[in-house]
Amino acid sequence: MGKIIAICNQKGGTGKTTSAINISSYLALANKKTLLIDLDPQANATSGMGINKHNIQKSTYHVLLEELNIQEIVQPTAMNNLYLAPSNLDLTGAEVELVGALGREYRLKRGLAHEREKFDFIIIDSPPSLGLLTINGLCAADSVLIPVQCEYYALEGLTQLDNTIRLVKDNLNPNLAIEGVLLTMADFRTNLTKEVVQEARNHFKEKVYETVIPRSIRLTEAPSFGKPIALYDKESLGAQKYEELVKEMLGIPLTNRVPDEGAVEWKEKP
């Protein structure tokens, strides 16, 4: 059965959707059949995969309302082995419409019940909040991957997320685990990045991935072209780091790790 990973942080701007898209892409390139689920009403993962969110008629909204089976909304992408369950603005109303629904926290889990057998990995891009949509993602998931931006106050907001994960684990999904903590938008020319990296490793110990995602012009450009970084610029530093991350997640030994020191956007080719 496939592994379900929710990518979650209630703080915006942490590289959550960028990570969801590119982790999914490199899993697909590693010959892992992967489903990316866009659970964010902003639908950035949908547009980042080159699909016009304004043209979406069937989305995760219809799955949560149990109007459609998830296989009815899944679309192929430009990459072999990678499929997308798209989102659109309709999802904004889902939390209100599900307020009085029985078992509302388990709508996505029920929707995925028969899909686990079809995929090696299912990656859920959660919205930047701790509302019902995120709770649905956490209840459906086996584990949660937390992206953390290398900036001041980055770790302070994790207390609330940590409490939410604990509550979900205690009351709704006892098998939920922390997949890992991913440090993003790092600039190793600054002391702040080094301090955040060290503080995160002190707090989360071995849960912090060795791979650190740098600030990268290419990573920020790729979504506007509707492409994951592997298709937009596979030689870029951001691409190399997401490839390293997925190898780390899969337990594949790295022979030539790209050094973190000095790894920032100005190092990339023009």
Image (cartoon, rainbow, N blue to C red):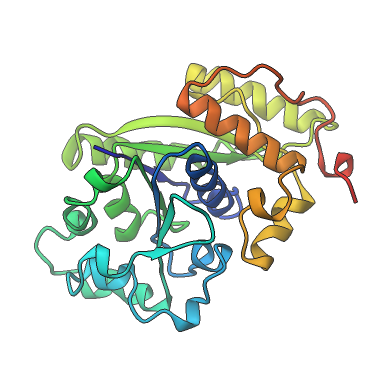
Residue 36 relative to residue 259: left or right: left
At a point 18% along the width and 75% down the height, the residue shown is 67
Q: Which of 191 and 261 is in front in this view?
A: 261
At a point 76% along the width and 47% down the height, the residue shown is 216
Residue 270 relative to residue 45: left or right: right
Residue 139 relative to residue 126: left or right: left
The image shows residue 92 at horizontal and vertical percentages of: 38, 74
Q: Which of 69 and 162 is in front in this view?
A: 69
Q: Quadrant of the N terminus?
A: top left
Please identify the quarter of the rendering in which residue 86 is found: bottom left
The image shows residue 191 at horizontal and vertical percentages of: 80, 28
The image shows residue 261 at horizontal and vertical percentages of: 81, 25
Q: Can residue 151 be seen in this view?
A: no
The image shows residue 56 at horizontal and vertical percentages of: 42, 79
Relative to 218, residue 248 above or below: above
Q: Can residue 124 be seen in this view?
A: yes
At a point 58% along the width and 26% down the height, the residue shown is 200
At a point 17% along the width and 40% down the height, the residue shown is 171
Q: Which of 155 and 232 is in front in this view?
A: 232
